């Protein structure tokens, strides 16, 4: 019998799936400077061209009060098989569910065992979770590439195996902005509750006691709040704490000095934060660097009698160490909304202490936040399924909307340069990829999306694996390819003057494409929003990057243009353009001929036999059409 969860059909239990697989390390971009703790909320993308271009890259390869049961049993708007299946594994706000139902077939199946989640993933295109579900490598293995996007309704994604998601080409998105205010308000609520012993006094009076002198608190005015992690939530907590008359310092290795100064907050080192705080509000993500960051050593550096609030991730606190610090009086009180294991077990050393206030992960639990998160994650998942690059992508280049809009013309240029370069590689292959950006912004240029598109353009020519923006870096690494990026100065207002791609190789199908460092090298730019090839090896060219191009190296002598044209005409090949580029009069030249259709093999074999033709190559396709 089928069960109903929230009114939507819940499928019966299924058998567990098989496990295992070796964990691969995450691929780190060679460009850093990514603000992992603080990202500015950005508007949704509406630039149709950007969506179409990035969509191709991502997709290649594989009435409100109406009763829920009635809606689930209703006939789909589209024919069966044309709407994606979206598995919602944890409860989601009504507004988000409505958006999902309008787009695809929604399966709300809650409280799934690991095996059941594997089985469901095998028949789902998207999966939406909150914090309880664990999306492990086994889930991605079971999906066999069908699962295209995992949406985390909230901020933290430590319950998703990002390595496995990337390996299987699955985009992971989160909803980092909608619950910001709710989490900040809960943090402030716990700070004030600690300062005035609200929870303890409440329990006392409900036990029939009247202990006014026992629960004397401390004032917040003039106290120093150390905000540990100055991202969205941390900065909102700081803003509110300033309104309470507190002095606020912050520790965050990625935070902007200008942002902190604007809020009246001083950025300090970790040791200075630990030594100077009266209250600590934790807002850092759970990473290998922050796991159990608050341990015996950290507590020993604090002022005696400090108070700690954690509404971030439970694992950043070493819970037994905090219990020891409370026993020793190093820490006076703690308020915890998150725990290393949720729900915390009876052996947790903190939950039954009178000097610890506990709440069951309520940071995002306001009506407004729940609906906001539901809408945000639904929109991100739908965008991903449509092939758009979600602004909140976790394991793919996460590019703000305004950056996507200005880089839009260069997306096809980047992929086209990768395609063009790799088509000129000889039998020996290549190991190194060099990407050059000429920009007036220098190292401030965000190149993550362009880098991914270059890699995609290269790899899709040489592998049968599905390549997309999510797994391009990983596939390059597993093939032993090394990627080097550099930026050179340029003048003008355009975000990019030109881009260059070079491949380190010992052989080439077209030696004219080799640069002074013996690399296959191509350069390109954007004119009137269209990509153009501007350099091949040492030769300056001016070629549209759409369609098929016949490339010929020739002697600089009369009659060769006519000879090549006659061969193509004999094969009924229509020429769209023709251009000749030379290094100097009487020296080597290259001829580029744009054709509407790929010439037949016999025609291609005849071109190199023309006297004066020394080399021949064919670009089957460069840019995105």
Image: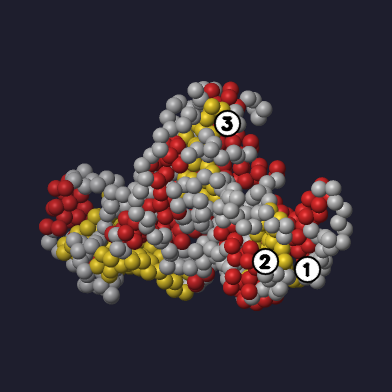
Image depth: mark 2 or mark 1 in front: 2
Left or right of 31: which side holds 302? right
Q: Nearer the viewer, residue 65 or 358?
A: 358
- Give whichever of discs 2 and 3 has the lower sequence position: 3
Q: Residue at x 12, y 61 (%)?
A: 611
Q: Residue 349 — which label?
A: none
Give the x, y percent position of residue 490. Answer: 47, 72
Q: Quadrant of residue 377?
A: top right
Q: CA distance from mark 2 to mark 1?
A: 27 Å
Q: How is the image coloured?
A: secondary structure
Q: Nearer the viewer, residue 146 or 336?
A: 336
Q: Please, is residue 417 above or below residue 105 in the view? A: below
Q: Residue at x 47, y 57 (%)?
A: 397
Q: Secondary structure at mark 1?
A: loop
Give the x, y percent position of residue 379. Answer: 57, 43
Left or right of 18: which side holds 281? right
Quickly name the residue at label 2.
Answer: 327
| Crowd tier of the residue under label 2, counting other residues whose Cα lies within 10 Å: few below 14, some 14–19, many 20 or above | few
Q: CA distance from mark 2 to mark 3?
A: 45 Å
Q: Secondary structure at mark 3?
A: strand
- Give whichever of discs 2 and 1 has the lower sequence position: 1
The answer to whether any part of residue 316 appears in the image is yes
Q: Nearer the viewer, residue 514 or 146?
A: 146
Quickly name the residue at label 1.
Answer: 246
Q: Residue 5 — which label?
A: 3
Q: Please, is residue 368 above or below residue 424 in the view? A: above
CB under 8 Å between discs 2 and 3: no
Give the x, y percent position of residue 1. Answer: 49, 23
Left or right of 142: which side holds 360? right
CB under 8 Å between discs 1 and 3: no
């Amino acid at each position: 019998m089928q069960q109903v969860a929230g009114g939507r059909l819940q499928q019966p239990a299924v058998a567990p799936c098989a496990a295992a697989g070796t964990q691969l390390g995450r691929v780190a971009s060679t460009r850093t400077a990514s603000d992992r703790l603080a990202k500015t909320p950005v508007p949704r993308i509406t630039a149709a061209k950007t969506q179409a271009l990035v969509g191709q890259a991502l997709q290649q390869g594989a009435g409100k009060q109406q009763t829920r049961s009635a809606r689930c049993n209703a006939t789909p708007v589209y024919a069966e098989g044309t709407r994606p299946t979206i598995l919602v594994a944890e409860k989601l706000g009504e507004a988000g569910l409505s958006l999902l139902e309008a787009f695809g077939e929604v399966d709300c199946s809650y409280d799934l065992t690991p095996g059941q989640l594997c089985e469901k993933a095998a028949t789902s295109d998207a999966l939406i979770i909150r914090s309880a579900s664990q999306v492990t490598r086994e889930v991605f293995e079971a999906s066999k590439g069908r699962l295209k996007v995992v949406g985390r309704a909230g901020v933290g994604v430590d319950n998703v195996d990002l390595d496995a998601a990337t390996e299987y080409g699955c985009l992971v998105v989160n909803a980092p902005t909608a619950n910001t205010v709710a989490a900040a308000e809960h943090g402030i609520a716990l700070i004030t509750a600690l300062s005035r012993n609200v929870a303890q006094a409440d329990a006392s009076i409900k036990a029939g006691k009247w202990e006014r002198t026992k629960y004397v608190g401390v004032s917040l005015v003039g106290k120093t709040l150390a905000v540990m992690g100055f991202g969205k939530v941390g900065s909102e907590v700081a803003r509110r704490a300033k309104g309470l008359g507190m002095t606020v310092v912050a520790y965050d290795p990625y935070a902007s000095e200008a942002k902190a100064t604007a809020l009246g907050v001083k950025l300090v080192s970790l040791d200075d934060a630990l030594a100077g705080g009266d209250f600590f509000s934790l807002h850092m993500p759970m990473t290998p660097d922050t796991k159990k960051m608050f341990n015996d050593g950290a507590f020993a550096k604090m002022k005696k009698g400090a108070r700690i609030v954690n509404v971030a991730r439970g694992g950043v606190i070493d819970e037994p160490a905090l219990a020891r610090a409370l026993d020793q009086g190093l820490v006076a009180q703690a308020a915890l909304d998150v725990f290393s294991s949720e729900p915390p077990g009876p052996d947790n050393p903190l939950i039954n202490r009178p000097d610890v206030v506990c709440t069951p992960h309520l940071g995002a639990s306001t009506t407004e936040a729940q609906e906001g998160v539901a809408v945000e994650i639904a929109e991100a998942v739908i965008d991903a399924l449509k092939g758009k690059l979600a602004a909140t992508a976790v394991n793919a280049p996460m590019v703000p909307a305004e950056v996507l809009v200005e880089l839009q013309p260069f997306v096809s240029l980047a992929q086209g340069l990768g395609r063009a370069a790799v088509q000129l590689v000889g039998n020996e292959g290549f190991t190194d990829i060099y990407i050059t950006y000429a920009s007036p912004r220098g190292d401030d240029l965000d190149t993550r999306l362009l880098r991914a598109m270059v890699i995609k353009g290269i790899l899709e020519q040489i592998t049968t694996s599905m390549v997309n923006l999510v797994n391009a870096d990983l596939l390059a690494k597993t093939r032993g390819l090394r990627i080097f990026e550099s930026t050179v100065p340029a003048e003008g207002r355009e975000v990019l003057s030109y881009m260059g791609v070079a491949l380190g190789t010992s052989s080439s199908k077209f030696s004219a494409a080799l640069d002074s460092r013996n690399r296959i090298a191509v350069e390109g730019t954007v004119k009137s929003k269209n990509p153009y090839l501007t350099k091949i090896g040492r030769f300056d060219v001016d070629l549209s990057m759409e369609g098929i191009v016949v490339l010929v190296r020739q002697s600089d002598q009369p009659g060769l243009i006519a000879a090549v044209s006659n061969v193509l005409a004999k094969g009924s090949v229509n020429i769209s353009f023709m251009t000749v580029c030379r290094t100097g009069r009487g020296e080597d030249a290259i001829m580029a001929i744009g054709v509407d259709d790929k010439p037949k093999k016999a025609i291609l074999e005849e071109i190199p036999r023309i006297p004066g033709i020394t080399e021949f190559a064919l670009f089957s396709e460069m840019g995105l059409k």
